[in-house]
């Protein structure tokens, strides 16, 4: 889907368990400037409901699972994130809504820029105008 790629991270495992190491500009396709995470989500809420003009993000669930509905203005797709080694990379102007948080779900986001509210498109009609 234009603007979205699915990533798989290499898992380093031994008898003690597993480890995933993520390096900027290697495993993550940009220089990571910000990390944030979302946790203790209520199961029936919708988060997101916005797009970004410039931000690049890699998003994954190290525990639990949730659904990401992605919409690039031409196509919509829902991806369930449910494994610490699976991620989505969003690099374009893509509307996202995330729902169906399982108990104990946490979502980690690695972002290419510092927080900037002016990079958000929080109105769906404005998003459609921006992508057309
Ligand atoms: C996204 C999805 C996956 C900050 O002060 N700094 C930050 O870096 C972020 C991300 C948020 N905030 C403040 C802004 C709001 O007052 O935290 C509050 C909640 O943010 P928001 O409603 O945007 O949260 P989500 O979960 O809907 O969206 C977030 C990110 O904002 C967004 O970039 O793609 O996670």
Image (tube, grey):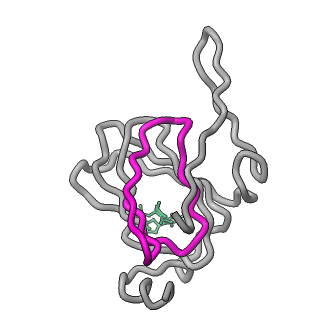
Say if the magenta span includes residue 18: no
Please indicate whether residue 60 sits to the left or right of residue 110 in the image: left
Q: Of 68 and 106, which appears nearest the observer?
A: 68
Residue under the point 21% across and 53% down: 44
| Residue 120 image offset from top left, x and y in percent | 50, 78
What is the number of callouts on the image? 0
| Residue 70 image offset from top left, x and y in percent | 42, 64
Q: Of 117 and 51, which appears nearest the observer?
A: 51
Please indicate whether residue 42 sits to the left or right of residue 75 in the image: left
Residue under the point 37% across and 70% down: 49
Residue reaching furthest left?
44
Where residue 65 sits, quadrant-wise, is: top left
Q: Of 102 and 90, which appears nearest the observer?
A: 90
Magenta-highlighted residues: 69-95
* Rendered view: 72 above or below 24: below
| Residue 50 image offset from top left, x and y in percent | 42, 73
Please indicate whether residue 9 sits to the left or right of residue 72 in the image: right
* Rendered view: 41 above or below 76: above
Residue reaching furthest top?
15
Say if the magenta span includes residue 82: yes
* Rendered view: 121 above or below 90: below
Residue under the point 56% across and 67% down: 3
Residue reaching furthest right?
25
| Residue 76 image offset from top left, x and y in percent | 38, 66
Residue under the point 59% across and 60% down: 57
């Amino acid at each position: 889907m234009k603007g979205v790629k699915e990533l798989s991270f290499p898992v380093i495992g031994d008898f003690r368990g597993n480890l995933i190491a993520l390096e900027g500009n290697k495993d993550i396709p940009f220089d990571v400037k910000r990390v944030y995470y979302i946790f203790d989500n209520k199961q029936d809420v919708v988060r997101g409901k916005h797009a970004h003009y410039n931000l690049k993000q890699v998003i994954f669930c190290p525990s639990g699972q949730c659904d990401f509905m992605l919409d690039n203005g031409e196509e919509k797709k829902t991806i369930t994130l449910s494994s610490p080694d699976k991620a989505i990379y969003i690099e374009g102007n893509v509307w996202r809504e995330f729902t169906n948080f399982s108990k104990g779900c946490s979502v980690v986001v690695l972002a290419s820029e510092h927080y900037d509210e002016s990079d958000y498109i929080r109105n769906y009609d404005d998003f459609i105008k921006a992508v057309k």
